[in-house]
Amino acid sequence: MKKRITAPREVLHELQQDYYICTKCKLCQGVHVQYCPESRFWRNCPSGTRYRWEPYYASGKMEIARGLHVNELEPSDSMRDILYTCMLCSSCQEQCYEVKQLHPTRVFELMREKAVREGWGPMPEHAPLVESLEANDNPFGMDKSKRGDWAKGLALKSLPKESAEVLFYAGDAYSSDPALLHAVRAAAQVLLEAGLDVGILGAEEKSDGALMLMLGDRDFFETYAYDNVETFNSLGVKLIVTPDTHAAWVFKEEYADLLDPGIKIMHISQLLSRLLKKNVLTPQKEVAMKVVYHDPCKLGRRFDIYEAPRRVLRAIPGLELLEFPRSTFNSLCCGGGGGARYAFPDYALWTAKERLFEAEWTGAEAIVTTCPYCVQMLGQAVEATGSKMKVFDLAEVLLASLGKEV
């Protein structure tokens, strides 16, 4: 029998102190206002700001958790909607932890696991994602045999047929969305420009399972996690690098303890920052553009990686780096978090449009980010509004400054 990837598991009642202590102080509804110069942008909970009803804020969901714990509440369709509109962006936890040391994001993750165990979660609209995973090892409908097609023509080694020091893990979104082809190829090309010994799994690459974990289906997630850990440990690589922030999240939080001790995990922004610091990469071509950097939630608030992508952008000649009013730990979710976009596309797009409005407020010509889901959602907002704003992946901008093309 396969061992659990996380053992022992946490269950909701183990965090009862958190949802019992919550006093509904409403700090979770906003940002650290001392770091946000514009009051227009002080609200930061996507679902609460959109629906303006207490249960959609973190404080309301904490009360729902307490009600479920003491059997004062029964699961309902409205409760499920409330739970799955949460983008798990951790803005609430960013505010709450400093004051009360509570973990609302973790409570909501465990509420979702409870919902799946008891059969009232996730949303019906999430079913096609699960079906695609079962059929294709990818939630987004791509035939598994085509998963490595994005890399055609690049001088990347094929693992495990060949050996390499670095495994480049593309991830579900980058390997399946044609609109992200330039971004993922740029990421791999930059690593090759640095002279790294890079290999990919190609068609043998499997989903990281992150989406299932966000939806609360930990059993399904663990199926992928265990298989991936076995594969990664068999390759003889020293480093796993991924441009996918959600993959980086589960690799760091869920896989790391089961990987061989000699294997390191990095998000590509960390690696690019280090390569620039060591002068392995030297941007020389000017990229004359005003850009504003969007912090992905999983990369920023989950892992405190704020400076690395900014160091990359500051190293590019001619580029002017601006900041959102809501930046770093105050960053607003792009709308693509928590799986909400698949069940509530209009609400997800509303969130992305709000972020786009904020980008335009700064006077930037382009948004740069380093997460496939952020690129997708912000791109959808641009298309829906007819905005002239451009959206780039971090690696695309760096590659251009190296004088290379995808």
Image (cartoon, grey):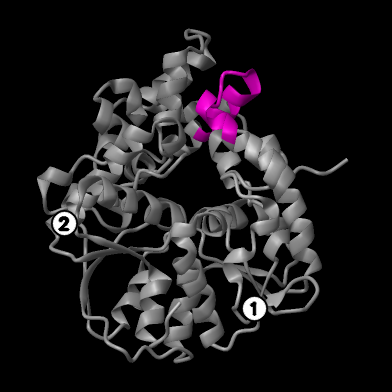
Q: Residues within 10 Å of mark 1 (few under 14, many from 20)?
A: many
Q: CA distance from mark 2 to mark 1?
A: 38 Å
Query: Is tag 2's residue or tag 1's residue first in the polypeptide sequence?
Result: 1
Q: Kindly identify the amino acid type of the residue bearing the numbered disc 1.
A: Leu
- In the image, residue 191 lies at what x, y percent? 54, 80
Q: Main secondary structure of the magenta part?
A: helix
Horizontal side of 227 relative to 365 (left or right) equals: right
Task: Give amino acid for label 2.
Answer: Glu
Circle 2 sits on which residue? Answer: 360
Residue 341 at x, y percent in the picture: 42, 38
Classify 367 as above or below 4: below
Residue 15 in sight here: no
**What secondary structure is marked by label 1?**
loop
Label 2: which secondary element: helix
> From which residue to which does the magenta span run?
109-128
Residue lying at 37% horizontally and 81% vertically, measured from the top left: 400
Residue 342 % position (x, y)? 46, 36
Quarter of the figure with the C terminus: bottom left
Residue 327 lies in the magenta-colored region: no
Mark 2 vs mark 1: give the one in front. Answer: 1
In this orientation, which residue lies closer to the viewer: 119 or 260?
119
Location of residue 182 by image quarter? bottom left
Q: Which residue is mark 1?
A: 156
Question: Is residue 189 positioned above or below 107 on the image?
Answer: below
Is residue 399 depicted above or below 114 in this figure? below
**Is 123 part of what is drawn in magenta?**
yes
Residue drawn where x is 17% and y is 45% of the image: 41
Give the quarter of the image for residue 54: top left
